[in-house]
């Protein structure tokens, strides 16, 4: 089998200012991240001939979910593009990067700029976190897939994922005391990340006493909306060596979708679509879970990171709760350091791209106080939950 | 019914009308494949099992079990009355045929996975929302 994505490397990374209610134009954040990534790669904008983003420009959805589309960035930077692709029907947020890998591998582009911008914190103002869909009253009517959940007040992914977590608790005896460690570990790492949003210590007692959002989830199981943009340059691997920074090579990608693409009809709610994406990724490499030195796994809700740990084979199916309990295995000096920047739970909801950014930081050895010891050689970045997911296995140059 | 919660209602279409209005006759209805008897949800123009396009509207028993649930405490939009129970109910007629719904007529602390439930309808003109309650 030819693993085409192995012809790709991540050669540049960039991130804008990240924060709560920055009040800045999301396109301004986007160009900050994009120009930083291009500069980081040692390229100029005239070298960029591909552009890829998730979820693309959107007219609907939660306020601030999309900060910029393809044409916004193409025009702002006056790029000449041989290939571009933006949308939401991807295998998770990192699907935009997987697409870029394929574009350079197949030769339609040489250097693809990838970006993801959110401005949910500013767009949702000082009010409570927004649900998806209409405001509940008036003439709004739910259509498409939303008609099956919105009439029941299941207006947020918090509800949809909570339903899955509760089923996991039932089938495998997983407890809140165990799940807590996704959040506690993230906070522990965020304390060492100057750019994280929440850095003050969080105790198990505080977690257990927190306000319930949708059982079994409490406030600390839900990520924090922010404004911010993250960008990458994906290049053909043979050219990456001549660029400014040591390249991070793409070893394998996982993007499978086998079960029904549905929040409630998917066959096994305790695994979600992550199961097949992870399984596919491991068929495309000789590396094994035990070779991975650091894992950056989507935690839009805490339970999703637990699911990724199981799907990727860091522990057995249903064993995630016991695996993370106490937090030592997933600590910076543990057997599989997890979400070293603080995850989306504590470092902010950069919506998938933050995990890939941190994976590259760790493989470059630039994590400073939060750097995983021992010069990590293999990293995992995974994003998505529910009926969509994608993952990337990365190696140091 | 002073405490009836605000609901976002579904937009009726020719494809979903049988489902959202069956409650007027007390009937929970799905599309069913005439050839292989597969119940199809959400509605689709073709049987996903045998690819037959000959479908009929079928009424099911309205019985099922709670596959999973969550107790929602967050007010996602103004007018929501919290807490309330969101559940996924698996229907008796077909493994894997599930509905996201609310459990009603059941104290929140009595909800359990595996609990037998039956459909009840809440009329919100022009639709009847299928909800579920414990089997007595």
Image (spheres, coloured by chain):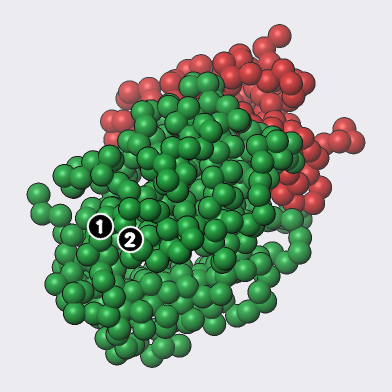
Residue position marked by numbered label 1 in the rendering: A395
Q: Residues within 10 Å of mark 1 (few under 14, many from 20)?
A: many
Residue at 49% x, 30% y: name it: A321
Query: CA gap, disc 1 to disc 2?
Result: 7 Å
Specify the farthest residue to the left: A1
Q: Colour of chain B?
A: red
Residue position marked by numbered label 2 in the rendering: A363
Give A335 or B113, whichever is nearer the viewer. Answer: A335
Residue at 18% x, 60% y: name it: A6
Is B120 displayed left or right of A322 in the figure? right
Residue at 47% x, 51% y: name it: A339
Residue at 42% x, 46% y: name it: A333
Give A184 or A368, whichever is nearer the viewer. Answer: A368
* Chain green in the figure, letter: A
Residue B5 lies in what quarter of the image? top right
**Badges 1 and 2: C-beta atoms under 8 Å apart?**
yes
Element type where label 1 sits in the image: strand
Give B62 or A75, whichever is nearer the viewer. Answer: A75
């Amino acid at each position: 089998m030819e693993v085409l994505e192995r012809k790709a490397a991540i050669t540049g990374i960039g991130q804008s200012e990240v924060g709560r209610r920055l009040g800045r134009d999301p396109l301004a954040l986007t160009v900050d991240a994009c120009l930083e990534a291009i500069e980081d790669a040692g390229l100029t904008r005239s070298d960029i001939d591909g552009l890829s983003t998730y979820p693309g420009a959107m007219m609907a959805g939660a306020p601030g979910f999309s900060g910029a589309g393809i044409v916004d960035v193409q025009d702002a930077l006056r790029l000449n593009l041989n290939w571009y692709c933006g949308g939401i029907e991807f295998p998770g947020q990192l699907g935009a990067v997987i697409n870029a890998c394929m574009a350079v591998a197949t030769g339609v582009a040489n250097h693809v700029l990838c970006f993801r911008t959110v401005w949910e914190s500013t767009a949702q103002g000082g009010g409570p976190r927004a649900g998806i869909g209409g405001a509940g009253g008036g003439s709004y009517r739910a259509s498409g897939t939303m008609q099956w959940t919105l009439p029941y007040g299941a207006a947020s992914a918090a509800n949809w994922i909570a339903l899955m977590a509760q089923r996991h608790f039932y089938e495998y005896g997983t407890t809140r005391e165990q799940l807590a460690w996704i959040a506690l570990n993230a906070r522990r790492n965020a304390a060492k990340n100057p750019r994280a949003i929440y850095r003050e210590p969080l105790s198990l007692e505080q977690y257990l006493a927190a306000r319930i959002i949708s059982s079994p989830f409490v406030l600390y199981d839900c990520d924090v909306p922010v404004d911010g943009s993250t960008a990458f340059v994906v290049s053909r691997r043979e050219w990456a060596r001549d660029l400014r920074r040591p390249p991070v090579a793409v070893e394998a990608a996982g993007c499978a979708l086998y079960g029904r693409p549905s929040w409630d009809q998917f066959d096994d709610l305790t695994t979600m679509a992550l199961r097949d994406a992870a399984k596919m990724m491991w068929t495309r490499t000789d590396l094994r879970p035990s070779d991975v030195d650091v894992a950056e796994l989507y935690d839009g809700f805490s339970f999703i990171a637990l699911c990724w740990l199981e799907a990727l084979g860091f522990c057995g199916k249903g064993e995630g709760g016991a695996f993370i309990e106490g937090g030592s295995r997933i600590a910076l000096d543990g057997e599989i350091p997890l979400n070293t920047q603080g995850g989306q739970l504590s470092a902010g909801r950069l919506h998938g791209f933050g995990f890939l950014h941190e994976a590259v930081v760790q493989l470059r050895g630039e994590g400073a106080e939060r750097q995983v010891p021992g010069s990590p050689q293999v990293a995992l970045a995974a994003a998505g939950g529910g009926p969509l997911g994608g993952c990337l296995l990365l190696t140091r140059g | 019914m002073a405490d009836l919660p605000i609901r976002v209602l579904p937009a009726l279409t020719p494809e979903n009308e049988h489902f959202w209005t069956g409650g007027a006759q007390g009937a929970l209805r799905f599309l069913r494949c005439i050839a292989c008897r597969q119940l199809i949800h959400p509605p689709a123009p073709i049987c996903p099992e045998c690819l037959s396009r000959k479908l009929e509207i079928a009424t099911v028993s309205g019985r099922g079990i709670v596959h999973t649930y969550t107790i929602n405490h967050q007010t996602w939009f103004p007018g929501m009355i919290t807490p309330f129970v969101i559940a996924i109910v698996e229907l008796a007629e077909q493994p894997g045929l599930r509905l996201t719904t609310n459990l009603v007529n059941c104290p929140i602390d009595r909800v359990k996975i595996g609990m037998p439930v039956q459909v009840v309808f809440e009329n919100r003109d022009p639709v009847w929302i299928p909800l579920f309650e414990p089997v007595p």
